Image: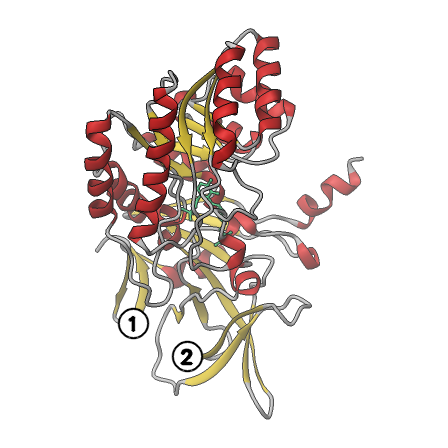
Amino acid sequence: MKGFNRKEGQLFIDDVSLKDIAKKFGTPVYVYSANKLKENLNNYVSSVRKEDKVCYSVKSNSNIHILSLLSELGSGFDVVSGNELRRCLEAGAKPEDIVFSGVGKTKEEIRLAISAGIFSINIESEEELERIINISKDLKKQAECTIRINPDLSSESHPYIQTGLKTSKFGVLKEKVDSMARKASESGSVNLKGIASHVGSQIFDKELILENLNLLIEISTHLTKQGHNLRYLDLGGGFGISYQEEKELKIDEVLTEIISVLEPLNLNLILEPGRSISGNAGVLLSKVEYLKKTPDLNFAVIDSGMNDFLRPSLYQAWHDISVVETKDKKELFYKVVGPVCESGDTFGEERLLSLDENSILAIHDAGAYGHAMSSNYNSRLKSSEILIEDEEIKVIRRRETFDDLLRQERDV
Ligand code: LLP
């Protein structure tokens, strides 16, 4: 069976036992299913037309081996920093398949993007447009751009992952677009090819996506009437995934609907999915260090902490936690916590688990915003990452060592 599956109580990716992976490579360790990544990308690619672009959002999981895998399957990339852009190029991505968003692009990052010839710099402010014009003139090379609109639309996700509100730092309000488009076109050095907008993350509401689409169509039609030659609408990412029991949108159905609207308008689509490609393709494996009892609670203290996986602490996000090998022992309610010196270093409250010391736990749906958001807090070493495809086990990042940790402080 492909992807995650349980056989006789044991958790597998394809035919590889995760218990064996933990034993062989140690914990904490992130383990990804290549087949799941492929399936998730394919959900998008098979639902759009050849001229549309699916640009995987690198911030969700930027391991270069994952980027190479997705690039080979025809994915484009959405980057948010010069180094993410460089990762993609190293991974073999074509510059013309890369879009670059971000409110704080430095001069060096803009220079890199224009020189590399990426598909689009998504402009986030009038000030950034000014900077792009100057740099493209200096380089004597046209900058390919879209303007990122702040749609002022609210989603119901956690406030930290909402990006489309008027009060958020992202994009420009639609009142600004006319003058910016004029300025871009008068500069002679910016090719404005479309309009972009990302409503936020964990979106389950199709109407919100369609509202964003209609807003972009309205702006794009208006600008076209003014003589601008816009061909692309970038709808961003944000398709929600089910961490608990959320009802996911059917990607193919939503995209078919979007494309049927765009087709007569002669507009192409760009998408920037992150979590819906990498999220359910990864787990974090951790070992139980202690089962600690207090009068009120049973704690399972595990060997990964908020430095390894921040989502539960930062967003109070739910992630399923299961034992990689189920046993007949009695189930108890546990508060699952890490070793980091913060009370917020908690992965779940009241989780019904059958544990003993040394049990291996899988924290599920950790492929997106997992390792990518990890840190060295408490001088903890960053975990390794493993990619599994069929029977092939590939270490795609080795575990950090104490020497790695001190290198930048010693080599000064
Ligand atoms: N495009 C843009 C412009 C974005 O800002 C984002 C995410 C994406 C695409 C990808 O969104 P996705 O398809 O993954 O939802 N650390 C948070 C998520 C922050 C997302 C920021 N922007 C989390 O762990 O939930």
Question: In the image, what residue occupies the spot 54% across and 55% down?
Answer: 160
Look at the image and tell me in which quarter the C terminus lies.
top right
Q: Which amino acid does label 1 sit on?
A: Gly
The residue drawn where x is 37% and y is 35% is 216
* Residue 32: percent from left, percent from top: 39, 50
Q: Where is residue 410 in the image (x, y as percent from the top left)?
A: 79, 40
Along the line of sight, the residue nearer the viewer: 89 or 16: 89
Q: Residue 9 carries which label?
A: 1
The reply to whether residue 75 is visible in this rendering is yes
Of residues 206 and 115, the one nearer the viewer is 206
State the quadrant of the N terminus: bottom left
Residue 372 image offset from top left, x and y in percent: 52, 47
Question: Can you say whether 132 is above or below 314 in the image?
Answer: above
Residue at coordinates 52% horizontally, 58% vertically from top-left? 159
Question: Which badge, 2 or 1, is on the more N-terminal residue?
Answer: 1
Q: Residue at x 51, y 12 (%)?
A: 186
- Name the residue that disc number 2 marks: 353
Residue 262 versus residue 95: which sits nearer the camera?
Answer: 262
